[in-house]
Image (cartoon, helix red, strand yellow):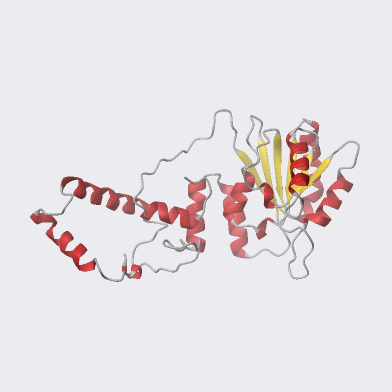
Amino acid sequence: MTATPIPRTLAMTLYGDLDVSVIDEMPPGRKPVQTLCVGEGKRHAMHNFIRDEIAKGRQAFIVYPLIFESEKLDYKNLELGYEEIVKAFPLPKYKVAIVHGQQTPSEKAFNMDAFAAGRADILVSTTVIEVGVDVPNASVMVIESAERFGLSQLHQLRGRVGRGAERSYCILMKGTKVSKESQKRLDLLCATENGFELAEEDMKMRGPGDLEGTQQSGLPIALNIASLAKDGLLLSDARSYAQHILDGDPTLSEQKNAPLAAQLKRDKYAVRDYSQIS
């Protein structure tokens, strides 16, 4: 079972001997999350938007890719970001909590509980809130340096909002230097909430990963003709036909299935070269 668009997971699902159930509807009452991608010039407007949502009784996540400033990476970091947010949303009108991986478990639990209980309006965090966080009252997810994240992470982070009945928003704040591939990821996230579409596009960009190992992207095998990204229906039909043959002739003893049986026997002790699959 997966709710995350990871290329290797999709590839294993396509190739695996699995029955696949697709849940393609949101829970009752949920509304789509509106996703926007904006630059640094819109930061003031973004802050005003968060203030408007808080005035309606809502809450907001603000996620950073780094805890501390990096000399090598030109990305927004949580340490400076928290200071900026506290200045933009001062006490006593606003309350800001902070969560990151270098806190003790009790510190993280205290701040997370404060946000979940509504005692904090804004939660500034790293990706530690990527999964397992359910705050239906949160309506805004701001992702700083969004170009730093992969599609899977962006999709998961967006899933932290839109869990209530109110309309929710995901704001992708991008830096001044964004590669074409990074911009394509951001555009894809703005275009769809469909995890299947995101997984397929991610697989086209990053490769299916290692089907027999743990590598989640890349192309350790090269198919001669078939494409995991484009030929999902064909793979499904082939698997169904193979199952139909085995249901009628489990031992492949019938004359019409002799070529199949011969091929299986020939390959029984052979070292498989998956690059020849097509």
Tell me what residue is drawn at x 16 percent, y 60 percent.
261
- Coordinates of residue 208 in the picture (x, y in percent): 46, 61
From this viewpoint, which residue is outermost toward the left? Answer: 255
Residue 224 seen in render: no
Question: In the rendered view, does 7 fall on the left or right side of 138?
Answer: left
Question: In the rendered view, does 89 fall on the left or right side of 78?
Answer: right
Q: Is residue 264 above or below residue 94?
A: below
- Coordinates of residue 5 in the picture (x, y in percent): 52, 51
Question: In the rendered view, does 257 fall on the left or right side of 66?
Answer: left
- Coordinates of residue 9 in the picture (x, y in percent): 46, 54
Q: How many marks?
A: 0
- Coordinates of residue 275 in the picture (x, y in percent): 35, 70
Identify which residue, 169 or 127, lies in the foreground.
127
Quadrant (top left/top right/bottom left/bottom right) for the C terminus: bottom left
Q: Is residue 20 above or below residue 16?
A: above
Residue 91 seen in render: yes
Tell me what residue is drawn at x 32 percent, y 65 percent.
277
Identify which residue, 250 or 5, lies in the foreground.
250
